[in-house]
Image (cartoon, rainbow, N blue to C red):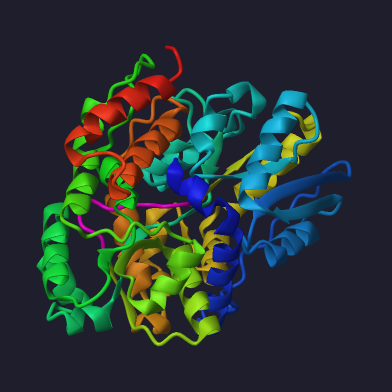
Amino acid sequence: MVIKHRRAGRLLAALAGSSLVLAACGLAGDDPSPSPTVTGPTAEPVNISMAFWGDFGLDALAAEYEASRPGVTIDLISGNYSDLHEELQRQIVAGTGAPSIVAIGEDYIGTFASQPDAFVDLLTLGAGEYQDRYLGWKWAQGSTPDGSQLIGIGGDVSGLALCYRSDLFENAGLPSARDAVEAAIGDTWEGFIALGKQYQASADRGAFLDDAGTLLKPVRSQSGASYFTADGELALDPVKPAFDVALDAIDAGLSAGVAPFTDQWDAGLDSGTFAATLCPVWGMGYIQNVLETSGGTAQWDIADIPGPGGSWGGSFYAIPAQGTPAQQASGWDFLNWLIQPEQQLRIFQATGSLPSQPALYEDDSVKSYVIPFFNDAPVGSILAKAVSELPTQNLYSPSNGTIEATLQDVLLQVQQGEVGSADAWAVATEAAGLAAPSP
């Protein structure tokens, strides 16, 4: 999808910024209750590796696990988001070199789930007993399209929220307190656009929204619609309502046409180029890091997005099939320990990224999670609501991202005046047909 490509070069910085901010807020480094000791050393020494991006909060956990498993050594490999996935694909093609465990991002899980032979089916290792613990849509994303195999079991989820300039809202005569903003929107995208129109009518500079193209994915995801049928045929009609929401925002003049996580966007966080943006938790950390580094004075707050939830990011744990039987068994033993509630909460307390198991959202550390920089926004509650409401998505094809990128490119052309709004859907349909693989 286009969002992925636009942010690829800066995603690692965003993730790092989020971790720094969480540490500054006092969440990272909390002293949670110790997890139970794992017993039962392995019969033979075994070395396993785990590749991921950014900070997954694993250093202390891996050391603790190694201490409880004499003979097991875990090599943690942190790298760049895009590079990790591209390297994994090369390793799959080559048939060698893959880590024992790999984290896979939400943007890429569909691509790898369509290559099930390259991974250990986690259902064969007993993962199925945990299905009821997980968010339904998250479990489905880690499965093959027919649900017969589980390629990746959920790590963190990155719920989606609305970050907005409370000072600019107030200056424009709009509600600025988060509860009042949510009430004004009324939990619909139509209400969101209506509020944007009020802002545009009252504001003396800038646009309401950074980039209308970012609306396509969350609105589509809330409907559960795929760009393809279960038979692999392109089917755009179910996603036209989401396209229309983005197009309506453009037609109403709400979009600044500034892609997230670019230099222009960074500057716009404080200059007033835009007053609102869709943001996951790592995006919140990125915003804070940019403004604190630059000495910005903008006042940002966080509210719930309209509609039934949202997610932008998140990870899955997978075991490539290239490892030896001993490495695969040890890899699953580590993952089986890592996904237990005690460890998942410790990861949250270290990174601020929600676990994929909704029962854990009742933990006090989640309920009490706020970010002071965003006016003490109750981020834990807001993001838990977002990921809990999101329906399961019918992502029948690994090419969903390709088609989404194509439609977002058309929306960008509309914003730039290269395609007329009246012709946008016809242009998008033609472009998607050319981009889609043959069934």
The spot of residue 295 in percent (x, y) is 49, 87
Quadrant holding the C terminus = top left
Which sits in the foreground, 162 or 146?
Answer: 162
Q: Is residue 369 visible?
A: no
Q: In the rendered structure, does residue 305 fall within the stretch colored magenta?
A: yes
Q: Which secondary structure dominates the residues rendered in magenta?
A: loop
Question: Looking at the image, is 32 positioned above or below residue 123?
Answer: below
Instruction: Tally the marks.
Output: 0
Question: Looking at the image, is 147 positioned above or below residue 345?
Answer: above
Quadrant holding the N terminus = top left
Q: Residue at x 74, y 40 (%)?
A: 100
Q: Residue at x 21, y 33 (%)?
A: 423
Magenta-drawn segment: 304-313
Residue 145: quarter of image? top left
Which sits in the foreground, 384 or 251?
Answer: 251
Q: In the rendered structure, does residue 118 fall within the stretch colored magenta?
A: no
Left or right, 433 with respect to 104, comes to: left
The spot of residue 412 in percent (x, y) is 35, 46
The spot of residue 25 in percent (x, y) is 50, 83
Question: Looking at the image, is 30 positioned above or below residue 274?
Answer: below
Left or right, 365 with respect to 378, comes to: right
Left or right, 153 with respect to 362, comes to: right
Residue 373: quarter of image? bottom left
Q: Residue at x 24, y 40 (%)?
A: 243
Left or right, 385 with respect to 341, comes to: left
Q: Is residue 35 visible?
A: yes
Q: Residue at x 39, y 34 (%)?
A: 406
Question: Looking at the image, is 365 positioned above or below residue 81?
Answer: below
The spot of residue 407 in percent (x, y) is 34, 36
Residue 181: quarter of image? bottom left
Which sits in the foreground, 153 or 141?
Answer: 141
